[in-house]
Structures are given as structure tokens and as C-alpha cells.
Image (cartoon, rainbow, N blue to C red):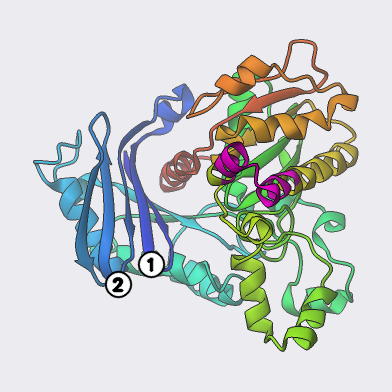
Amino acid sequence: MNILVLNCGSSSLKFQIIDTDLEKIEKNEDRELARGLIERIGSEALISLKVEGKSTIKTTAAIRDHKAAIQYIIKWVTSPDTGIPGINSLEDIHAIGHRTVHGGEEFKSSVRIDNDVIAKMEDNIELAPLHNPANLKGIYAAREVFGPSVPQVAIFDTAFHSTMPETAYLYAIPYQYYRRYKIRKYGFHGTSHRYIAYRYRVLTGKTKNDTNIITLHLGNGSSACAIKHGKSIDTSMGFTPLEGLMMGTRCGDIDPTIIDFLHHKEGSSIDEIFNMLNKRSGLLGISGLTNDMRDLEVEITEHQDRRAQLAIDMFCARIVKYVGAYLTAMNGADAICFSAGIGENAPDVRAKVCEHLEFLGVKLDKKLNNKMIRGKEGVISTPDSKLQVFVIPTNEELVIARDTCRVVLNAPLP
């Protein structure tokens, strides 16, 4: 079964085509056939395309909307010159899986998309005004291009965290606001945290019930997740992705009265303040230079930049604080797993985090840690470390493809 995986932003579209079926899922023999990214939709778009085993193609084209972007993808995918194995026409795409950010309380697992699902996603737009409209654009466009004969499935970022208890997801504000407006912690990056937990089980041979780990999805957006008996019991992102860890441009946890204070001191509107908290804070706000961890490390190495160092130190300190809190909430764990762009490729960040956990018996193998970059996967702790430490490259697209396959074939979801 060839699954087209779509991840739509407001002016971008990422895609993969993955060949999978129930037998391949069981044997871990899924195969990525192609992938690509279209950016700056609505103008002269930047396009990056890659077929398995071939070099990346980079080009530009005038693409006015998401429908045009999907049509461009289909034309490229089905061209004989492209040479994707097993794909020669539109009929060779058997199902479509959509990464959808917010499922609210309605969606606790992946679902086949119909008019009722779309209506509920539209109702949740006010919970995710930056993400759900973009995700819906992709769904509308794909339905128009492929028609009703090709099944489409929504995979929700929030679904994995639906197992959190009330003590974790409720805020200590009047309960009536939860009842009226569903103000609560939802958590995000759920597809990534779920994949990391799955790979941990593959690497260790543990069952889902024996999976007690803390997963760290560290990138421009960052979140931590406490996974007990294979289920999310707490996560750092909250009502929106702004809560929690310090991120590339997001502030993470702050005292909410800062918003009112800045409103009066600076004369800034609420929208302006939230724009600052989302887009000009985090690593960028502290360093004053960049939100890219790689560039910050260069600034430290070449210029001994104090604020670049401060930004990284703060980033790591917030991670340590959450890890410590989750270890207590879980009554201990077996492993800590680093993932995503920073987690997979910044050995110094991993080392700095683990230094603060030495009193818990965490021991890092420095050579393994330094080698574990660019897609490598495995243990970076010493054999006598009381908590194992892993680097596990995330693969949200694979989770989306597998769930799409299972839903279409009416197979049980994990």
C-alpha cells in the first residue's frame, strides 16, 4: 500500500510516500519511496524533491495554493522520468495520511476523515489557530484532487497525550473554564513521542507495559514527555505549544503576569506580546543572534559569545528541571531518550543535560555520545549507568503512514 503523507503549514507542504502494509509493519520493512518540501506557497515557491537512492532536486515554481502544491507533487510523482518504484499514475496512491495538530478532546486516536471529522476539526480551530487551518487546507485540497475514492486519515499530535490524568492536564484555575471552554493541557509532538517509545521497545525488547521512559523532542519546538507503562502521563507543552521548555523562538514557562506588566510598561497589545513570546523569545531572544543551536555553538567556539552560551545553558537547565520532575512523578524511569534536530545532533547539549543527572546514577559514554549524530541511533550511556540514555531519531511520517494503513484496513491501532 502506497501512502501519501502530508504535513501542511500555512504556506508550506511537506510530503513523503511510504510503501507499507500490515505485514511490513510487523516486520519493520516499511519503505520510504520519495519525499519533498514546498515552501512559500502563494508566490514563487521553493521546492525540494527526493526519490529513494537518488540526489535531491531543488527548483522553483509559481504555486498559488495548497491544491496547486498537491497537483505539482502528483505530476512529479507519477512522471516516468521521476522513476518512483510502483508509482505510475494517481491510482497508485492508495491512501493519504494527514498530520493534524489539534484533536481537542474529541479525537483520542487516528480516524478516517469524513465530513463529521472535518466539522469537529473546524470547531477546534480556536484551540489551534496557527495550525488547524493549515492542516485543513491540505485536507480540502487532497479531497478535491483525489476525490472520494481515496481514503484519507487524520493523525493528531494531541492524541498520544489523551491518556494524561486530570491531575496533569487540568490547570488550577476555576473549573468552570474547563467545562465551558475546554481550557486544559493538551500537549503536542505526540506523534514523535509515540514513535520514540516504539523504537525504544524495538531496541530493548521491552513490552509496552514495561516502557517507562522520559522522551525529549528537542528542536526549534521542544517538549518533554513522561511515558509510564507505554502511555503519556504528562508532557511539557500545554493548552498551546508555548508552555513548557525553552525553545528556538518560544519562551516556554513564564509568570503570566509578565504579559500584563509588559502591556502597561511598553504599551504593547496582547497580540504583540504573544507574537514576541512565540517568535522572538527562546534561544533567539536570549542570544539576540539566532534560534539555531548550530549557529550558537559556532558563536561560542569562534567568538566566546556570552549570551550564546547563556542561551544554551538556560535551554539545558529547563530540560533538567522537567526530567527531574518527571522522574519523581513516575516514581523512577528506565531511560531518557533524546530526539529531533537538537536532541539527535547536539552532543554538547546532551552532555550538559546528563551532567546534572549524575547524582541519579546517569553516566554518559563520551565517545558514543559524540559519535551519535546524523541519523545514528542507540545507547550513549555506560553499561553501569542506572538510567540508560538513548538517541533515537524521530520519524513522525512513518507513524502517520502506519496509522493510515491500519485505519483503512480496519486493523487495531497500537
Is 133 rendered above or below residue 400? below
Q: Does the magenta stretch include residue 309?
A: yes
Q: Which residue is drawn at 20% across and 37% down?
A: 84
For this orientation, the residue located farthest to the left is: 80
**Nearer the observer, 62 or 79:** 62
Q: Is residue 156 left or right of residue 161?
A: left
Q: Which residue is drawn at 55% across and 60% down?
A: 101
Q: Earlier in the sequence, mark 1 or mark 2?
A: 1
Image coordinates of residue 42 in percent, x first then y, are: 30, 72
Image coordinates of residue 409 in percent, x first then y, are: 41, 43
Residue 191 visible (yes or no): yes
Q: Are marks 1 and 2 in contact (CB under 8 Å)?
A: yes
Residue 83 in which image quadrant = top left
Q: What segment carries the magenta color?
A: 296-313
**Nearer the observer, 313 or 113:** 313
Dot 1 falls on a residue whose secondary structure is: loop
Residue bearing the label numbered 1: 11
Residue 144 visible (yes or no): no
Mark 1, other Cα within 10 Å: few <14 / some 14–19 / many ≥20: some
Give the distance between the C-alpha atoms of the residues marked 1 and 2, in whole angstroms: 7 Å
Residue bearing the label numbered 2: 42
**Nearer the observer, 122 or 354:** 354
Residue 209 in which image quadrant = top right
Image coordinates of residue 401 in percent, x first then y, are: 42, 43
What amino acid is found at the position of numbered circle 2 in the picture?
Gly
